[in-house]
Amino acid sequence: MVKVYLKGRIAPRIAQGHPWIYNNEIDRVAGSPEPGDLVEVYFAQGKLAGIGYYNALSQIAIRLLTRQRETIDAAFFQRRIQTAWAYRQRLGYTENCRLVFGEADQLPALIIDKFNDYFVVQTLSLGMDRWKPVVVEILVGLFAPKGIYERNDVPVRTLEGLPQQKGFLSAPFDPLIEIRENGIRFQVDLENGQKTGYFLDQQDNRRAIAPVVKGAEVLGAFTYTGTFEIHAGHYGARSVLGIDISEQAVAQANANAALNGLADRVRFDTLNAFDALKTWHKEGRKFDVVMLDPPAFTKSRSQVESAVSGYKEINLRGMKLLRNGGFLVSSSCTNLVSAELFLDTIAAAARDAHKRIKQVCFQAQSPDHPVVWGLENTHYLKFLVAEVSD
């Protein structure tokens, strides 16, 4: 196996367990590894740092699979996936869950989402992509799934020299499936839905809105397929209006409302959330609960300031649409905006709106997307429920 030696002065995060090694942290490569090959990595002092896959074409040149000297083969991947599954089983995330969360489960660049008997796989680096057939074989052996679908239609793969693609990794099946979450039915489009088709990371947070939506007039912005809004209807909201800029998402959201017998109280319209929130404030419209679940406003550190401005604007406008003593439900899904910065942004919006904030709950993603201390990218979701008063 080719040996890679790190520079004498490197970020301490590697010694502390972070699996990413950047090109500028490598001193020399003793050999000529092909992109995707496994390599042994050594600190400058000669101590083994671990074994991982190498790709000089990527800014992240090496992603470590292990910190020990061990064989990387199908049995290795089977152990890691079984360990990840045992963790979810212990915590009760078995029907629908993120079965493998990349670095958090010591399988960098591998995402596996489990939707009951169906699985969606993403291999986001060249090294992991080589093991895709092994991963599929393991899933078949462990779960005998009804179907496996590949959602590798993500831009990050181009940074690894990989094509964007999607399709069946099993015998073809209807990719529009139905799942149950918190006792509610949802259609999930594994082929065309965002990411892997459904955002499993908010499943606990969607339960958290139950106390504040009962009997309330609710507005949801950036609804996607309506999961928060349909939960609000299920938990007893008097009326729910959801808005999203995507006509396809709105159509599926309305179908999900009908699927649960909630079409009389929960409806969705195709609107630009920024424009609608501004217009409705001018018109004097008011709600008891405003829920904001926008997409990541940035995937680049250079655009964090712009993203913070966007978060501040929508939360400011959301607060102004609330009746006195109403509730704001707000999320951010980018790890580039820290929890502290997210709360500071909402606090700034409250000051500008002349509002008082009383926190009901503040939490991260559900534990099937584990937060690993020292791996900042695993701590990405921020979710706040707060009472807003004059």
Image: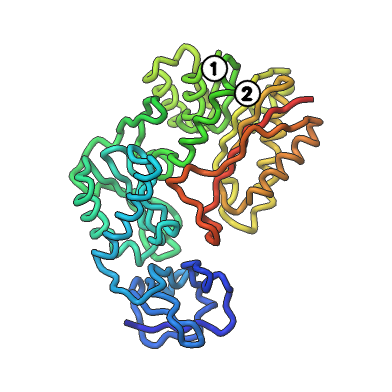
- The kind of residue tagged 2 is Val
Q: Quadrant of residue 178?
A: top left
Residue highlighted by disc 1: 237
Residue 81 picture location, percent across and down: 31, 55
The quarter of the image holding the N terminus is: bottom left
Q: CA–CA distance between discs 2 and 1?
A: 10 Å
Proximity of marks 2 and 1: CB atoms separated by less than 8 Å: yes
Q: Viewer-proximal residue, 198 or 302? A: 198
Q: Residue at x 71, y 29 (%)?
A: 319
- The kind of residue tagged 1 is Ala
**62 lies above or below 300:** below
Disc number placed over residue 25 in the picture, else none: none
Q: Earlier in the sequence, mark 2 or mark 1?
A: 1
Residue 375 picture location, percent across and down: 53, 60
**77 lies above or below 259:** below
Residue 277 picture location, percent across and down: 66, 27
Q: Secondary structure at mark 1?
A: loop
Residue highlighted by disc 2: 289
Q: Secondary structure at mark 2?
A: strand
Residue 56 makes an appearance in the image: yes
Q: How many marks?
A: 2
The quarter of the image holding the C terminus is: top right
Mark 1 is surrounded, within 10 Å at the Cα level, by few (under 14), some (14 to 19) or many (20 or more) other residues, namely: many
Mark 2 is surrounded, within 10 Å at the Cα level, by few (under 14), some (14 to 19) or many (20 or more) other residues, namely: many
**118 lies above or below 325:** below
Residue 267 makes an appearance in the image: no
**35 lies above or below 176:** below
